[in-house]
Image: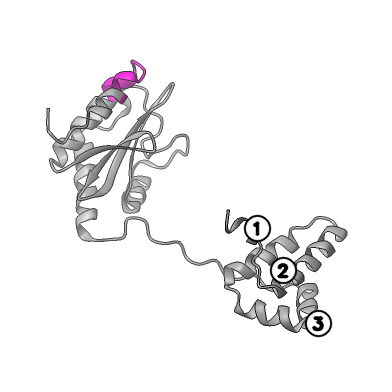
């Protein structure tokens, strides 16, 4: 057995349901065949395969199915185009219940080598999501800020995300009374330089 194989994954496979063991063993073998530099580890309680310090792919077994997935977002997009994304299970091959549910070895090796090339290309594994646009300040909050010079000054200094937290808290109120209470609390807290969740920041 390769020195890069982790006994913790041996134990994971051994404890898996009988139907899943040959699936996991086959996928594991193909990963090493496609990329001899792979290093095995357990991440989030499941076997993962790392390439040059970054997760390349992972396998998992559940009560009635097994899964396999790539970590690079480029592979997610590629496989979504080729085989579709079922949404029925974690990973991109859907719920795998037997070896026949897997693509052929040739196809799987092709996917794995493509994933290695993506990692080698330096393309971002999971690009940062675009920042959410800041919601408009509701008129009642805008009027309240005009009446409090201290709150207005602190509001301008808050980050967009801090302002968003307050706006969404106020506009999320279902009752008029609740909204009014939240509005008064917002002005009080903002004037004191406190963010919406200030009570938990030092917990």
Neighbourhood count class around disc 1 (C-alpha, 10 Å): few under 14, some 14–19, many 20 upward? few
* Foreground: disc 3 or disc 1: 1
Q: Which residue is most to the top?
A: 18
> Looking at the image, what colour scheme do you see?
one colour
- Name the residue nearer the viewer: 1 or 62: 1
> Magenta stretch: dominant SS?
helix
Question: Which residue position is annotated with label 2?
Answer: 189
N-terminal of the pair, mark 2 or mark 1, is 2
- Name the residue nearer the viewer: 154 or 61: 154
Can residue 42 be seen in this snapshot?
yes
In the depicted structure, whether residue 8 falls above or below residue 19? below
Identify the residue shown where x is 78% and y is 57%.
173
Numbered mark located on residue 150 in the image = none
How many numbered circles are shown? 3
Can residue 99 be seen in this snapshot?
no
Structural distance between the alpha carbons of marks 3 and 1: 25 Å
N-terminal of the pair, mark 2 or mark 3, is 3
Q: Position of residue 125 (x, y in %)?
A: 32, 55
Structural distance between the alpha carbons of marks 2 and 3: 15 Å
Q: Position of residue 61 (x, y in %)?
A: 37, 27
Q: Position of residue 80 (x, y in %)?
A: 38, 46
Question: Which residue position is annotated with label 3?
Answer: 147
Neighbourhood count class around disc 2 (C-alpha, 10 Å): few under 14, some 14–19, many 20 upward? some
* Foreground: disc 2 or disc 3: 2
Asked if residue 136 is among those painted magenta in the image, a careful observer would answer no
In the depicted structure, whether residue 116 falls above or below residue 68? below
N-terminal of the pair, mark 3 or mark 1, is 3
Could you tell me if the residues under marks 2 and 3 are in contact, i.e. CB atoms within 8 Å? no
4 to the left or right of 89? left
The residue segment tinted magenta is 12-23
């Amino acid at each position: 057995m390769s020195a890069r194989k982790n006994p913790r994954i041996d134990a994971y496979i051994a404890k898996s349901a009988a139907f899943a063991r040959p699936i996991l063993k086959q996928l594991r073998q193909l990963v090493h065949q496609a990329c001899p530099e792979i290093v095995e580890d357990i991440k989030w309680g499941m076997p993962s395969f790392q390439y040059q310090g970054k997760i390349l792919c992972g396998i998992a077994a559940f009560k009635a199915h097994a899964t396999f997935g790539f970590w690079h977002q480029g592979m997610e997009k590629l496989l979504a185009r080729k085989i579709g994304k079922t949404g029925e299970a974690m990973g991109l091959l859907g719920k795998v219940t037997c070896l026949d549910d897997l693509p052929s070895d040739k196809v799987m090796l092709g996917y794995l080598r493509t994933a290695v090339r993506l990692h080698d290309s330096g393309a971002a594994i999971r690009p940062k999501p675009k920042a959410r646009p800041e919601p408009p300040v509701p008129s009642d909050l805008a009027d309240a800020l005009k009446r409090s010079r201290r709150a207005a000054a602190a509001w301008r200094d808050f980050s967009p995300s801090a302002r968003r937290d307050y706006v969404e808290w106020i506009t999320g109120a279902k009752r008029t009374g609740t909204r009014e209470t939240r509005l008064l609390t917002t002005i009080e807290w903002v004037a004191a330089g406190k963010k919406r969740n200030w009570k938990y920041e030092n917990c």
